[in-house]
Image (spheres, rainbow, N blue to C red):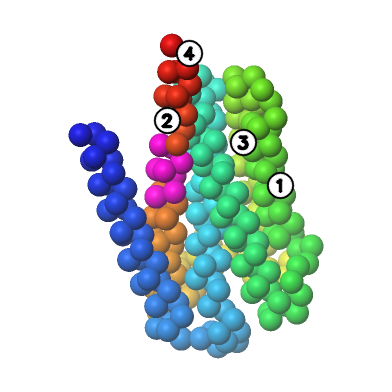
Amino acid sequence: MPQVTGKKRKGILGAATLVFIIAGLYWGLIKAPPDAYQGDSQRIMYLHIPSILTAYLSFFLVFLGSCLYLWKREKRDDNLAHAAAEIGVLFTALTIIEGSIWGRPTWGVWWTWDARLTLTAILLLIFIGYLMLRALVEDESRAASSAAILGIIGFLDIPLIHMSVYWWRTLHQPPSILRPDKVPWENIHPELLTALAINFVAFVLLYFYLLSHRLRLSEMREEIKARRMN
């Protein structure tokens, strides 16, 4: 019965994710008006911003799981950190790709060594290194401990990414939502903000849908390992 309940919950989560993705695409591509300066190229914002915020959420869970693992040494915390890191790498890579697509018509180049872009690329490389470390070190306990330390260090790059547009001269625009001087509805047109909010909810639901499956995969691996030992 618990497995059936779990499947039903995942089914509901998957259905809700699909509904919000469709609604987000409608609002972002059709309902919301084009930007006054960037035109329709601005519409990729509805994917770009939710994907990086979802990546931040994922790496926060890596940070949390890593801290808990180093404190309590429980496998479930390590599994959470590992699963979150894999999905965080995916969303960070998507963010960089989307940013490049947006940057080409806006800046005239696919890539520039802007402070925010560079720090985001470093974030991606840190967590790719995190996954490589886990794959290459044969001792699971040692791999988990080393990866936990790297995961905590990697998370510290996120405040640098966020503040980079204030600390250095950059091409990248200041944050559209997380600004210390303005609330979102004072900075963005209501219809644009609605499209952004719907897509953010869609990305978060998609994230937890993927995370639930990835954690279940970790549980299955532990079950197989326990059976082999017996």
- Residue 70 occupies quadrant: top right
Compare marks 1 and 4 and give the one earlier in the sequence: 1
The reply to whether dot 1 and dot 3 touch (C-beta < 8 Å) is no
Q: Residue 121 at x, y = what percent?
A: 71, 54
Mark 3 crowd level (few <14, some 14–19, many ≥20, 10 Å Cα): many
Distance CA(mark 2)–CA(mark 3): 21 Å
Q: Where is residue 226, by image quadrant?
A: top left
Q: Secondary structure at mark 2?
A: helix
Residue most extreme to the right: 113
- Furthest toward the left, the residue is 1
* Residue type indicated by callout 4: Met
* Mark number, residue 125: 1
Q: Magenta part of the protein: which range? A: 209-216
Q: Earlier in the sequence, mark 4 or mark 3?
A: 3
- Asked whether disc 4 touches disc 2, contact meaning CB atoms under 8 Å apart, the reply is no
Marks 1 and 4, how far apart in space? 35 Å
Is the residue under label 3 in contact with that under label 4 (CB below 8 Å)? no
Question: Alpha-carbon neighbours of circle 4 within 10 Å: few (<14), some, or many (≥20)?
Answer: few
SS class of the residue under badge 3? Answer: helix
Residue 174 or residue 197, whichever sits in front: 197
Q: Disc number at residue 229? A: 4
Which of the two labelled residues, at mark 4 and mark 2, occupies the earlier sequence position?
2
Viewport quadrant of the C terminus:
top left
**Separation of residues labelled 1 and 3 (CA atoms):** 12 Å
Query: Which of the labelled discs sits on residue 151, or is there none?
Result: 3
Q: Which residue is mark 2?
A: 219
Q: Decide: marks 1, 2 in contact (CB < 8 A)?
A: no
Three-letter code, disc 1: Leu
Q: CA distance from mark 4 to mark 3?
A: 30 Å
